[in-house]
Amino acid sequence: MQTPSSSAVAVGLVASRLLLATATSATDYLIHDHQLSSPLTSFRNLQEGIYLFNHGINPYSGGVFRHSPLYLSLFATVLPSSKTFASILWTFCDVVGAWALVKIWHARQNVSSTPRDGLIAASYLLNPYLVLPSLALSTSSLENTLTLLSVMFAAQGRASAALLLMAVQFHLSLSTLILIPPLLMLLISTPASSLALPKPFTGSTNRLPALIIEFTAYALGLTAASTLVCNGFSWVPQTWGATLTLPDLTPNPGLWWYFFTEMFDHFRDFFLMVFSVHLLIYVAPVCVKFQYDPLFATFVLAGVLGIFKAYPTLSDPGLFISMISLFPEIYPHLRHPLVTALLHLHAALLLPLFHQLWLMQGTGNANFFYASTLVFACGNGAALIDCVRAGLRLAIGKEVEGMVVIQE
Amino acid sequence: MILLPTLCLLFLTVAAVENESFSEDVALRTLPDGRVATTFTFNTILEKEAPRDPRTLFDDQDESQHYTLFPLSLGQVLREYAVTELHLTLNAGKWDYDKWGYPSEPDVGSGASLWTWMADGAPNSIDARWSGLRNALAGLFCASLGTLDEQRTTSPVIPFAPEGSLPDWGIPHRLRHASLASEHVCTENLTPFLKLLPCKGLSGIASLLNPHRLFDADWHGMGIHVLWDPAVGVQVRMTFQTVTNPLRAGNIRKEDWSFRSLFDRRIERVCPVASSSQVSVGLPSRGMYNLKPEPHHITDNMGHYDLTKDFEPMDVSIKWKNAFEYLLEPITPHPMPISFRRMLHGNSQDRGQLVVTLDNHLDNAIDILYLETMPWMVQFYLHTMTVEHNGSVDNTLLSNLSYIPPVPHAQPATFQVIVTLPAQAHIKLSIDVTKAFLRYTEHPPDAQRGWDLPPAVFMPLDASPLDAKNETLTTYPRGKRIYSSPMLVDLATPDFSMPYNVIIFSCSLVAFLFGTIFNLLTRKWVVLKLDGEKEKEE
């Protein structure tokens, strides 16, 4: 693919996206959808919070508003919160996300342009799991962009920018915390692919304390700013606390909501702890195993987040799926891409269908939608397992006639 | 032989009754649609007494409660929790304001409703006392008032200002209000009600309270109101209101009624301790009728009978000459300043739209205070609130918005706004709402039936505009509370039969993915020769 044509494709994609968002009523229809925006990322809840804030009512005193004070201060003062403007902003963020993905690819390959650029941008801009939440004005799209920008800066070695964006992202969505260790590793080593040549970690670890202190300083600064915005710490239980205690059981494509709807009251706290700690369990092993390729570790942990985080939307697994395009070297070693794709197809058809049957038609019950979220988790799990396996298998090299590669 | 103890008893009664008085009253009036509204009022006054100061709650000695007429079981509850003012109503049915006008007792919201004013500053918190009071009253009246918990408690001080006075103890008084629209009112609530009366249901006007007939009425409701007036003392007003339809009972097509036809009883005896016992009958202004017996005196279109003088068994009856003519057109002038409708639109189980229409029947603009005490299951999107006046959006008609957001699983929302209704205006107020998803243990046993949302309250305000921030209770110009009917909201339900299955399925999946990933990460890669001879490579 030639560079001019790929940029033409990108312009075309962006224009059609804008047209879809502003000229059609797609946004009005999708904005309510539980799969595209969770209570923590819904644009309507954001508007409600801004309304309450502008009317002198503390939006964190209860109710539906669970967005970070950073969003609140941004949208209540600097940015207008009209839907048309939001559509433009969201499209712009998607473009920035795609651009960041291409830049990460460049950093990994250590070149300034490749023929795959168009393909990588398209994998972000055409990914339905990312397009639809963005049309629904889910703030998870903005968070994805921030994550990608932060990874991009880390891959380019620009520590302050990467850490600042990561701190912002940590404020917007608590579970992104687990991406911080691989990002720090990425900052002190190289983004280049060494999946094929595993070696002990080579980064300069003596830079690590400074980086951690810098990140902490940013995070504390943002916490102070948030506290100033809402005159106290009332935002903490409403935003971060919601991720840990799951007060809102609105359905989403994740695993938490139905589990805690059906949970026995006396086990609720225990299982909330288990589900929260479970996310952290992956960090150390993945970072240790992929110490030679922290970008791949970031990618794997993004996949973990897409499956297991509280209040996910389709854009969380969407980010993982789009990031697969950064690692073409693992494609030959994927064992069951077709099964994964079919699982995703299956889930993508079942999720909206069963959601509609349960809540609108009243002909299906909650179990239908729950079952489709399980299928979706299986699809994401299959993709994650396959990628991890391929990433490890790559090091063994091509299979020779008469030999077989297995794990002991 | 019998005479002596009776005389003694009488003497004792008279001696003790000195600072207590009891009066009873029943008022009947024919409504424009042919129904008959009956209001029983039983007043017990504890003269020159004051409510208990909550700061004395943990003192060893409370003053002795030697009541003769005053209901002891209620008095004990009031003193135990230092309640200054209390209003408990248990109603069934929908009061049709457009046909019946204002009720004699304003609190006609469906279901159970309890609101109290208590002084804050006690050694135990006001919420602890409120909780104790709810449970005590639940026991006293056999009603599920215990479920009026924090998830239903609000304190909207403007529409629920105290009826009596609040003692000036130098500590603030607080309001606690809760309502339960799904509460059913029946004879098990009437029995304890009658037990609080000095003559029970045996004599006097209370003997008309025949449960078979009362609970057959189109609308019925009972109320206990405790208030304090420094000039009078502590007053307990117990009320029972019914709206019966005489046209339904007979085949004579006349709205004739008598005590016999309404209550299947007549007043056989007077209550000996009642200082006043009065029957009032509204004299209809239309048609020809015959009221028997002749009223003792007539004031303001009301005929009054005084039962305490020259009593003989009494059965008041009205007989009409002509058949009843059903109203084909709305009553003019309209009996109410406003009419309203409240609806929840939308067929989805996750969101909807609350629509309130208000009609002003007056020729001048009027301010209406609109109050919603919404359980957290239904959450408002206030930014979508719009007001349509004669078809065009005009949000300037709303002012003084005050909103306490709901807290999921904990606290309801209190939404209060003043709507300005221009003369003869038709106004439509709509708010998008989102319906919460509940834990499976939070659903009631019959979950598919839905949830009853408490009635909204409208209150016409007198001309001067209010400053909601400057809530000085005494200076508030206020009209009477108007209650909407409750609403039913359909919430999405999980499957109640399979908590185990869900836990097992989800945990299995998590364990499988976790296990597989850790297998991949921890196990060593080996290259095997297919003929079985093993050769390690990694």
Image: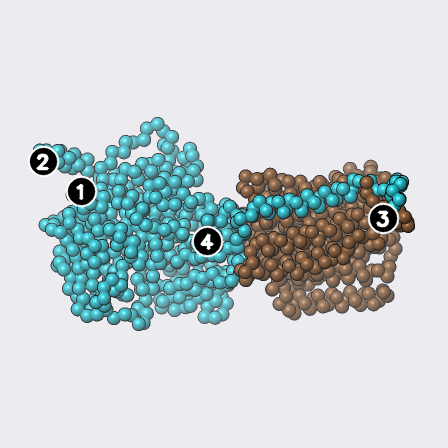
Q: Secondary structure at mark 4?
A: strand
Rendering coords of residue A260 (x, y %): 58, 46
Q: Which numbered disc covers residue B163?
A: none
Mark 1 vs mark 2: give the one in front.
Answer: 2
Q: Confirm whether circles 4 and 1 share one chain.
A: yes
Query: According to the image, label 1 marks what residue?
Result: B273
Residue type highlighted by circle 3: Leu
Q: Confirm whether circles 1 and 2 share one chain.
A: yes
Query: According to the image, label 2 marks what residue?
Result: B3
Mark 3 vs mark 4: give the one in front.
Answer: 3
Residue type highlighted by circle 4: Trp
Going from N to C along the chain, the mark reached first, 4 or 1, is: 1
Q: Confirm whether circles 3 and 1 share one chain.
A: no
Query: According to the image, label 3 marks what residue?
Result: A394
Do tag 2 and tag 3 residues touch (Cβ < 8 Å)?
A: no
**The numbered mark 3 sits on a residue in which chain?**
A
The CA distance from mark 4 to mark 1 is 45 Å
Query: According to the image, label 4 marks what residue?
Result: B451
Going from N to C along the chain, the mark reached first, 2 or 4, is: 2
The CA distance from mark 3 to mark 1 is 99 Å
Q: Confirm whether circles 2 and 3 share one chain.
A: no
Rendering coords of residue B301 (x, y %): 20, 61
Q: Confirm whether circles 3 and 4 share one chain.
A: no
Q: Dot 3: few (<14), some (14–19), or many (≥20) neighbours within 10 Å? A: many
Residue type highlighted by circle 1: Val
**The numbered mark 1 sits on a residue in which chain?**
B
Q: Residue at x 16, y 43 (%)?
A: B272
Residue type highlighted by circle 2: Leu
